[in-house]
Image (cartoon, rainbow, N blue to C red):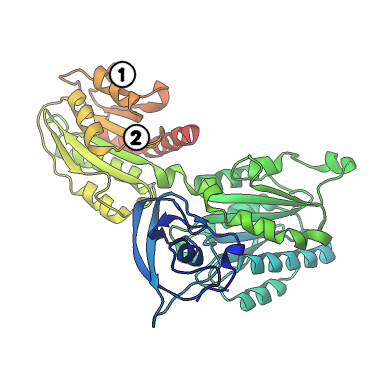
Amino acid sequence: GCPAGCLLRRTSVFGTNVYAAVSSVCGAAVHSGLLGTSGGTVRLKRLQGRHGYRGSSSHGVQSQSLSHWISSFSLSKGGNSVCVCVCADCQADIAVVMDSSTNIGQRRFNLQKNFIAKLAAALKVGATGPHVGLIQASDSPKTEFLLTNFTHPKDLLFAIRQTTYLGGNANTGKALLHAAQSIFSSELGARRGHPRVLLALVDGWPSDDVERAATFARDSGINVFIVSVAKASPEELSMVPDRNFSRKAVCKDNGFFSYSIPSWFNAAKHTRALSTRLCSLDQLLCSKTCYNSVHIGFLIDGSSSVGYVNFQLVLDFLVGIARSFDISDVGAHIGAVQFTYDQRLEFGMFDNDNKEDAIDALRRISYMSGGTSTGSAINYAVHNLFRPAARGRNFLIVVTDGQSYDDVRGPATAAHSQGVTIFSVGVAWAPLELLRVMSSEPKDTHTFFTRDFSGLSDFIQPVVHNICTDYSHNN
């Protein structure tokens, strides 16, 4: 059942009638008119994820729009049913990096543990709510517990209080990188489709560099928050290796991801405000990255000059690119067109909703053999693979081994104007000038050439890196 006064707390609701699963169930129940503020019981029906949740204002609740989510639910009047209807609207996976350095000392370390315990209580950690993991920053990072180790509030609070002080250097950068690389893996319990948050508590300043770890976290869709406690005094500033460490570490330097607390002695009063930020789904800007947001079309030359053996090397190259992205129903998507004089849609951008199926579809493409009309193939691919999207989301990778029999300049220019970024990958006899005409600006980072098909594998990482660079620049 839903308790009375649910809406006195902050609730996030996404959708109308059908709600994204990240929504507060109680907030959705009030929004749909099934419950009033006095609470009650509703029946919840789990549904598949979808695109285009529509926001609306209803019964005093303003629901928000959401482009897509991994799963949904609908509600009806309560009866003899099992209903998980809690007043917590936070669905994030949150890894906390705590300061265990010699600088903080045992007394302030204990105050820090008390702060983390109160923050966990404010978040209302639970099996269906937020999950919390804990890492200590010292000379080397130490994982105290993973996201799924303690999902019952009492067990979690006990585990926090049992954490013992380490001492040593405040190597926050090492701890952030360790957390980003390990804690959020699905094998260790991170939930697919849930926002990933990395909260670092820093007493004074870090002993090491945080920028590399922060870049990795951002590229992985992890939202880094920095809570600075007891900042360096003016006479201590000369000892700080990097005064701008917080700005370099956070998900985005817009003020939202940085939080300052004057002292550990009054830290507890900041837990509610901080918990609200950690659960603000619409503000978690790093949840979307190139790896889980781009649409990549492969335009594959199937002309007679390629040959069957080399065609398989082209497919290996494209599979290598595809493996680098988080392909799923709510993540990145790929589609493929093969061309000679004619074009063949091998599979559409939204035909495969997981990486395994998408890669299988790539590997199953059969070699056509024929002539080479690259210009008309670009037109065909743009119209048959892509939906309108923000600039920096739609990418077309053209792989060809020779001269086109038709004009490529017009179709390529039209594709650029429609927000499709083109990477040209040439092999063997493909003229460099033709490749550069097709490529997006800057030409040097969007044009690749190798004399032999076996050299394509060297381009996998540079192409992936440049896709992510374009995405970051435009988003």
Q: Which residue is mark 2?
A: 395
Q: Please name the residue shown 20% across and 23% down the image.
A: 375
Disc 1 packing (10 Å; few <14; some 14–19; many ≥20): some
Q: Residue furthest right?
A: 235
Provide residue 112's location: percent of width, then percent of height. Answer: 76, 63
- The amino acid at mark 2 is Phe
Question: Regarding mark 1 in the picture, which secondary structure is present there?
Answer: helix
- Is residue 365 visible from the viewing direction of this image? yes
- Report the Cα–Cα distance between label 1 and label 2: 16 Å
Residue 409 position in % (x across, y down): 26, 17
- The amino acid at mark 1 is Val
**In the image as oriented, which residue stretches furthest toward the bottom?**
80
Q: Label 2's element?
A: strand
Q: Is residue 70 above or below residue 160?
A: above
Percent coordinates x, y for residue 189 in the rendering = 48, 66
Q: Earlier in the sequence, mark 1 or mark 2?
A: 2
In the picture, residue 448 is in which quadrant? top left
Q: Is residue 6 above or below residue 174?
A: below
* Residue located farthest toward the left when viewing the structure as drawn: 370
Residue 169: assigned label: none
Tell me the tag on residue 437: 1
Q: Residue at x 76, y 41 (%)?
A: 241
The image position of residue 254, as x and y in percent, is 63, 40
